[in-house]
Image: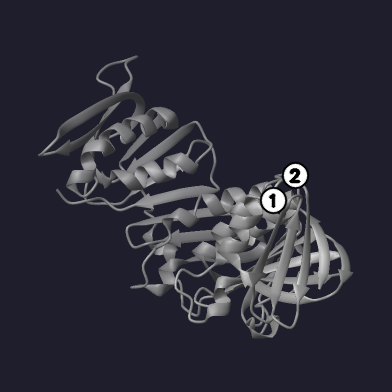
């Protein structure tokens, strides 16, 4: 195996695939990145068996001798990142599985593991379904944060994805909140297709999208229950979760007694100030919603965060309030996280009293909703 690549391309490729590395791999080769020549290109790949995730990136290369090897991903990436912006020459000694690396005045040797020990790639088909990259990235970012991060309820560590008719729906929940986003497709499905994709795998898809003008190819699950996302030269394959996502429609309130329209940036700033103190009280933030007291007067929303040890903060903002006053407590961190990922400037918070879930929606946009459970006081 002998080839040359540009340092910038190699560093970028290694940075992309290394995100799939396991923190505690079961085999030494899972610490490694696969390097394999393919049609005047260099294929870089990392497999995470515990997540059922693989990330592949292909970069341009001048290949003299074909071949493959696996190298310690972190060491190789650190070395490449510290090379000069120049051509990198890679020459493999197959007898010792040692890669000789030369770039400018720098030269070094890195011991690898035979590529035959690398686990099979969980690759799916490229598929003929394409979706606008900007749309897909926005959908993922606006739901994936709401997925559970622990394994006590495995189904909630995934994002429910449904293709039905000409719509795609994504939903994520952790038992305390629910985020649902619906988008339009050019492709039309005769029968609904449901899948539960690990949240971390979808997050990597969003990170891989750098150009919002491109499209993402989706290879739908086959008999192996693998879904593949192709973003330019990057392929991300994910093993679907073998669990049933709960019927989230039952969690969404059907009516409300108070509807409050606010500016998102004002609400976010007030919540961030309250969170400084609320973190000492299980992130409990209290919202007082007060309708207008007279004709021509705005309503008010007061957000309070308290800490017995450090003090408190109270922020008030004008709002358009319809219905009854309400005094309700939420996990303030959950409000902050959703407000950070919404691009809309105006949002609506709907509630049916302090014992019922609240629903946050962008003003004038029905494609997204966020349900948040109240906290007891």
Residue 359 lies, with reference to residue 264, above or below; the image says: below
**Along the horizontal axis of the image, is 81 left or right of 5?**
left
User: From this viewpoint, which residue is outermost toward the top?
Assistant: 296
Q: Position of residue 208 (x, y in %)?
A: 64, 54
Disc with the residue nearer the chain's start (2 vs 1)? 1
Q: Is residue 203 visible?
A: yes
Point 26% across, 51% down: residue: 356
Residue 150 position, x and y percent, is 36, 67
**Depth check: 62 or 249 in front?**
62
Residue 276 in the image, given as x and y percentages of width and height: 26, 37
Q: Residue furthest left?
A: 308
**Residue 218 screen position, x and y as percent:** 70, 65
Observer-nearest of 245 and 156: 156
User: Is 274 placed left or right of 268 in the picture?
Assistant: left
Secondary structure type for disc 1: helix
Q: How many marks?
A: 2
Query: Is 288 placed above or below 45 here?
Result: above
The N terminus lies in quadrant: bottom right
Verify CB contact (< 8 Å) between mark 2 and mark 1: yes
Query: Could you say which quadrant of the image residue 310 lies in?
Result: top left
Q: Nearer the viewer, residue 340 or 326?
A: 340
Residue appearing at x 54%, y 57% in the figure: 203
Neighbour tally class for label 1: few under 14, some 14-19, many 20 plus, Cα within 10 Å: many
Residue under pointer 2? 213
Comparing 178 with 127, the one in front is: 127
Does any portion of residue 246 appear in the rendered image?
no
Q: CA distance from mark 2 to mark 1?
A: 7 Å
Residue annotated with mark 1: 133
Residue 153 left/right relative to 362: left
Label number found at residue 248: none
């Amino acid at each position: 195996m002998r080839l040359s690549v540009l340092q910038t391309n190699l560093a970028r490729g290694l940075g992309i695939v290394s995100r799939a590395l396991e923190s505690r791999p079961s085999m030494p080769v899972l610490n490694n990145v696969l390097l394999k020549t393919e049609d005047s290109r260099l294929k870089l790949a990392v497999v995470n068996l515990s997540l059922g995730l693989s990330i592949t990136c292909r970069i341009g290369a001048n290949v003299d001798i074909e071949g493959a090897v696996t190298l310690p991903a972190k060491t190789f990436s650190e070395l490449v990142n510290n090379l000069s912006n120049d051509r990198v020459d890679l020459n493999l000694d197959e007898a010792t599985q040692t890669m000789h690396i030369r770039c400018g005045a720098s030269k070094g040797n890195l011991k690898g593991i035979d590529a035959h020990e690398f686990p099979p790639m969980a690759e799916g088909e490229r598929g003929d379904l394409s979706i606008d990259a900007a749309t897909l990235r926005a959908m993922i970012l606006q739901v994936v944060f709401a997925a559970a991060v622990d394994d006590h309820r495995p189904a909630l560590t995934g994002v429910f994805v449904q293709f039905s008719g000409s719509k795609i729906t994504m939903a994520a929940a952790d038992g305390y909140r629910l985020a649902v986003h619906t988008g339009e497709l050019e492709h039309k499905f005769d029968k609904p297709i449901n899948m539960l994709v690990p949240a971390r795998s979808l997050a990597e898809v969003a990170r891989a999208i750098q150009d919002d003008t491109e499209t993402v190819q989706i290879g739908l699950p086959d008999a192996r229950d693998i879904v593949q996302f192709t973003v330019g030269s990057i392929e991300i394959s994910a093993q679907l979760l073998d669990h049933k996502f709960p019927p989230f429609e039952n969690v969404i309130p059907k009516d409300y007694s108070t509807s409050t329209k606010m500016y998102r940036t004002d609400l976010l700033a007030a919540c961030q100030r309250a969170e400084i103190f609320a973190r000492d009280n299980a992130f409990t933030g209290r919202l007082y919603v007060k309708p207008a007291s007279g004709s021509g007067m705005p309503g008010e929303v007061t957000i309070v965060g308290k800490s017995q040890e450090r003090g408190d903060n109270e922020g008030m903002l004008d709002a358009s309030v319809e219905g009854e006053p309400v005094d309700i407590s939420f996990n303030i961190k959950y409000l902050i996280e959703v407000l950070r990922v919404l691009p809309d400037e105006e949002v609506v918070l709907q509630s049916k009293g302090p014992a019922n879930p609240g629903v946050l929606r962008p003003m004038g946009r029905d494609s997204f909703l966020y349900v948040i459970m109240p906290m007891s006081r």
